[in-house]
Image (cartoon, rainbow, N blue to C red):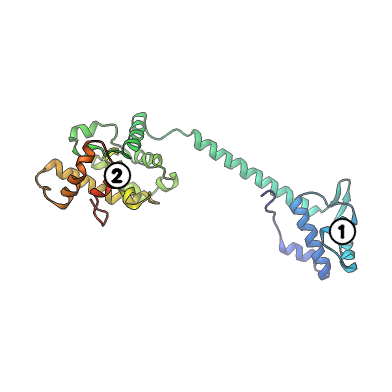
Amino acid sequence: MVNAWVSWYYGDYMRDTGHLSLVEDGAYRRLLDHYYATRKPLPAIAEQLQRICRAVADEEKEAVLTIIQQFFILEGDGYHNRRADEEIAKALDISGKRRAAAKKRHTLASVQPPVNTPAIAIAIASTTTATSSIPHPSIAVGENERAVSPSIPQAPAEWEAFFIHRGFPSHKVRGNIKLTGLFRQWIAHKLSMDLVGHACDTADAKRGSPPANPVYYGGFVEELAAHGKARRIDPQRQQGTPVQKRLAKAAPRFNHGHFEKQDYYAGVASDGRF
């Protein structure tokens, strides 16, 4: 809505109108309301002024004329109120500055370069596209291959870019102490974006929608990373466990590239753990 606000100083108004009667005070307020709403001078015709105030009785009509004589000055384009003109000018100036600042922020946000390298950007794009359909076998990749993979971030800023690319607002990702701690743990364990992306998709499927805070994914990532590490160290160790059975149940669909929403639940227990 245009002209939605203007400053109003009750102390100044009470000081200048303490001598007015109830009818005169009501007429003055209605004239000011019309003045601020239209941000135009009042018409120089008595009947129009009285209609603006909805003055019907003779006392009300007389009150309108009294207020006009005391508080308004007739100029070429109509009746002006000096204080109202000043407040309208201030409001327009503030609105203009806020509009310019918002436009500047929007422009800077649209042209700001990504914090990740081109290789990381490619990895993020491939992760967000592929993990929505087929889980990646990065948990079974050897340590040497993981160390040189461009999809393994080396700094928290790269993980921040990963989650911003997934649709989380930047102000909820950057500067989040809990998230930064998680990112440092993932970097220390050389977790790939493929693995984390798969864990995030699994968590979203169980929840029904993405969480408000990416910290929610921490437990899913830890479970998936721990399971992958156990498989690399001792494949027989997990054989026959409930975790192994649930993953084995989903494996045929994974291996043939047919991965649907219900496949997420094949590897997830009722408490959300793998």
> What is the residue that sits farthest to the left in this orientation?
236
Q: CB atoms at circles 1 and 2 under 8 Å apart? A: no
Q: Is residue 120 left or right of residue 172?
A: left
Q: CA distance from mark 1 to mark 2?
A: 71 Å
For disc 2, the marked residue is 184
Between disc 1 and disc 2, whose residue precedes?
A: 1
Task: Name the residue rendered at 82%, 54% in the picture.
Answer: 81
**Which marked residue is nearer to the observer: mark 1 or mark 2?**
1
Q: Type of residue at label 1?
A: Ile
Q: Which of 237/130 is in front? A: 130
Q: Quadrant of residue 119?
A: top left
Q: Say what secondary structure mark 2 lies in.
A: helix
Q: Say what secondary structure mark 1 lies in.
A: helix
Residue 43 picture location, percent across and down: 86, 51
Q: Which of 217/134 is in front? A: 134
Report the number of numbered marks. Answer: 2
